Image (cartoon, coloured by chain):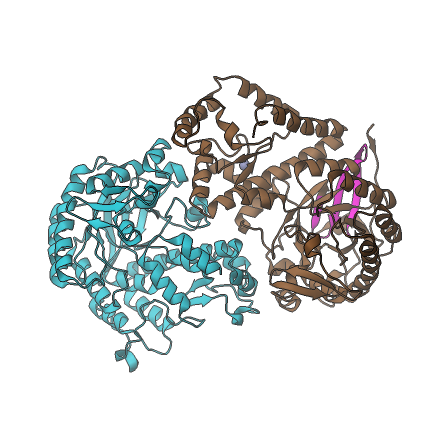
Amino acid sequence: SPALKFEVLAQCGRARAARMTLPHYVCETPMFMPVGTQGSVKGLTSQQLEELGCQVVLGNTYHLENRPGSELVAEMGGLHSFINWPRGMLTDSGGFQMVSLLHLADITEEGVTFQSPTDGRRMLLTPEHSIQVQNRLGADIIMALDDVVPSTAADDARFEEATHRTTRWIDRCIAAHGRPTEQNLFAIVQGGLDERLRDISLKGLVERDTPGYAVGGLAGGEDKRSFVKVVSQCTAGLPDGKPRYVMGIGYPLDIVICSALGADMYDSVYPTRTARFGVALVPEGMLKLKNAQFAADYRPLDEECGCMVCRRYTRAFLHPLAAKGLPFATNLISYHNIAYMMRLSRQIREAIKEQRYPEFVREYVARQFPAGDYPEWVVEGCRLAGIELSSSGSGGTAAADGTGGSAAVGSGGGVAAAAAAAAADGSRQGGAAADGAG
Amino acid sequence: MRRRQRAAAGGGGSGRRQAVAHLGGLAAGACIPLITAMFTVSYSDGDARSGELSTPSGAVSTPGLLVYTHRGGSMNLTPDLLEPLRAAGLQGLQLDALQFLNQPTPAVVQGGGGGRKFMALDGPGTVLVATGRDPAIYEYAGAMRQATNEWASVTTPTGAATVTPERYVEAVAALHPDVWVALSDDIPSDSRTDRAAKSVDRTAAWLAACLAAAAQQPGLAAAAAWAAVQGGQYLHERQRYAEAVAGQPGVSGYVLGGLGTGESPEQRQQIVQAVLQRLPAGAPRMLSSVGTPEEVLEAVAQGIDLFDTAYLLDVTNGGYALAFPLSPEADQAEQQAQQQPGAAAGAAAGAAAGTLQAAAGVAAGEAPADACGRDDSKLNLWALAYRTDKRPLLPGCTCFACANHTRAYVHHLLQTHEMTAQVLLEVHNTHHYLQFFREIRTAIAAGRFAAFRDWFLQRRQRWLVSEGGEQ
Ligand SMILES: [Zn+2]
Ligand SMILES: [Zn+2]
């Protein structure tokens, strides 16, 4: 593709480290991409994201088209210029948000019909329209409109229909794409949790030879064993020389496992969303800073982190501020959480390049589950990746916990549950932020 | 006319210049030389004066702004955004010691190395002033704060609490401030005479108790103690206290408390005048919780040196960017630019706003683009006029927000309730207000403060009767 160059620098088992050249930035994968839903990553400036080493930032097409509108963004010189972000950008198709946010969304062959949230009119989002809007926004990577079915929906016939329709729609997306030399259209593999359908989707899309591929329809609350199986099947079925993006993935452990299976790109609101609940990401899992145990804990959030926040502040300082959900504290924790995700991505890349990724995974998992009670899906994911986890007897009894970092330093399931809900929809940040502050 | 004078008003001890070196954390039990804040007046212009408050941590040029903090942090700014504001003149921070009574407790703060280190404010050059009042929380008559001779009932971030002078000093000491203000019985200006009299008596007793408690605190050995002057709206009560406290050993500065609680500008002026007459001329004087540009100019004209205020917080939370010109020259240039309809920026913005105003149901083509989104001193970034405005918040401003972002972006962030809007606005507003204080100091040093003040106040009048009048 004229707008994307993907060079695999190192392969370690199924995992790979690559250099991806985009029109605005040369990225290193595997990488985590923070989500700037409406043109900013909650509370952070574009310059802070640069400082933190972010390579690609996401924008949500549905939200940006609502406000300020893609025509205005185009008038302002495109999304890069509007938010003053010089590096890579990716926009989604808008379909996912529509289906997850608007109860009245209805999908037909023509597109997604929905009721306008502003004036109640019936509107139609077609593949052509989604691509036009994304062409106006001008991100380096744009996403095809796919027929999204929540992976937990039970109707087999519906999955079958969605799989085939997604393939039909990619042709319409390709035909509508007006800036193929400046923007890269990624196709999205669908097929729910069904191996046969995923296979059909893979074949159809690989034939279309798009510059990159995403694995869609996951991160929606499906059981994690099915999740790793689908990721494994899709990464195996996608071309080696093209980037593979698992959509909506933001739990650190998920990223470690997906990278073992050969995935390259991830995005989620999780690190910033969870910061608003007073949760800091650390190698052991997470710190629930609101917990009283941190009231006189003078350690930094993460003793191995060299970020601005960890260099200056202690858990004791942040504890009462996080408990109140003060913007100052939320911004600091968000900053650290993004720093953590960037460090994790870097460590993954280095371990792959140094041919020690299996060791890295073993250490990472052992740290999150010091008792050795590895969740079944982690064991399964590693098995699929050809990585042996030193099992400690209890390996068979799954912890049945869908969230990464269940070895949380704090306790209580409220935050984890909220975070799982957060990951399920990549967007509804405002409302939950208010909850988090309460 | 301008006259130069130098008056050191240290509270005793060795007030030598080399004492201004950064001390860092004070080791407990170490032999600490007694160093208190030194105040030097360099220029006087009428009653206005300009000088410097030197402390072990750094110096604040006066008239100066103590930037508001909430529980040890700025409202929205991470340290990397606060740090560059030093170049714009950020020298001092205000901390409300009452925010450190409970969460965190003084013991927690002390355990973390003291406030300076705990709050990561230990870089050289930042003067910390601990007060007993949060300028963002107004306590009007209805919610008048209760007090007995032993304690005051106060509002803290974790709810109401009672505080004695001893407990207050414990919280202050943990902060390791350069200057601290003794606990006072702070009452609103509409309090009755007997309440005001009681407030004065209590405040005097609490000052003595605070000073006694502070003598036991190694963390306060190098800090200057200031007294808050109370007395409500009653000039005789204000003066009674000012006379009693003027020249009291151990007290090296004064705060005018209880203001910003609903008194009229004339009342405030009278109170300030009555109190300042009775205080030593060479001592620093701070006005607490009052701080719009006009209020600052009036108070500076009367001889006030320092301000703590939540004004920037209000401006930022309202979605405003300060945009008043900083000098008569800049004002003139701006007026000329606006009178030329062909001026590039105005025309571009006007054209853009034309379509958007139409879209928003506003009759297009009648007012300049800015008129619907600004008053004499600030822009309302919520206004649709800024939807496609590619200019920085304030053209010519060198702050981080103006150097990197447009009005259109900030407008969009507000519209979508993105917190980055407040971050960018707080950077700009703090930067601009620090520049304003710098201009005030320059005007005093040049002996043209009265002209500066008249220009600023007339500018507002001019604006009210012209374009903004109908709003
Ligand atoms: Zn960190
Ligand atoms: Zn600015």
According to the rendering, which colour does chain A have? cyan
- Res. A250 visible in picture: no
Instruction: Please tell me which residue is depicted at 76% across the width and 40% down the height of the picture.
Output: B51
Left or right of B401, for residue A103:
left
According to the rendering, which colour does chain B have? brown
Q: Is residue B45 above or below residue B420?
A: above
Instruction: Please tell me which residue is depicted at 74% across the width and 50% down the height of the picture.
Output: B258
Q: Is residue B54 magenta?
A: yes
x and y percent of residue B35 in the render? 78, 55
x and y percent of residue B458 in the render? 68, 26
Q: Quadrant of residue B34?
A: bottom right
x and y percent of residue A243 in the render? 23, 51
Left or right of A375, for residue A209:
left
Q: Nearer the viewer, residue A221 or A396?
A: A221
Q: Magenta residues, as a range?
A: B37-60
x and y percent of residue A132 in the render? 24, 37
Which quarter of the image is occupied by the N terminus of chain A? top left
Extreme bottom residue here? Answer: A393
Q: Quadrant of residue A358?
A: bottom left
Q: Is residue B174 magenta?
A: no
Q: Is residue B98 above or below residue B330?
A: below
Number of marks: 0
Q: Which SS does the magenta portion mostly show?
A: strand
- Res. A198 visible in picture: yes
Q: Nearer the viewer, residue A20 or B384?
A: B384
Q: Nearer the viewer, residue A89 or A352?
A: A89
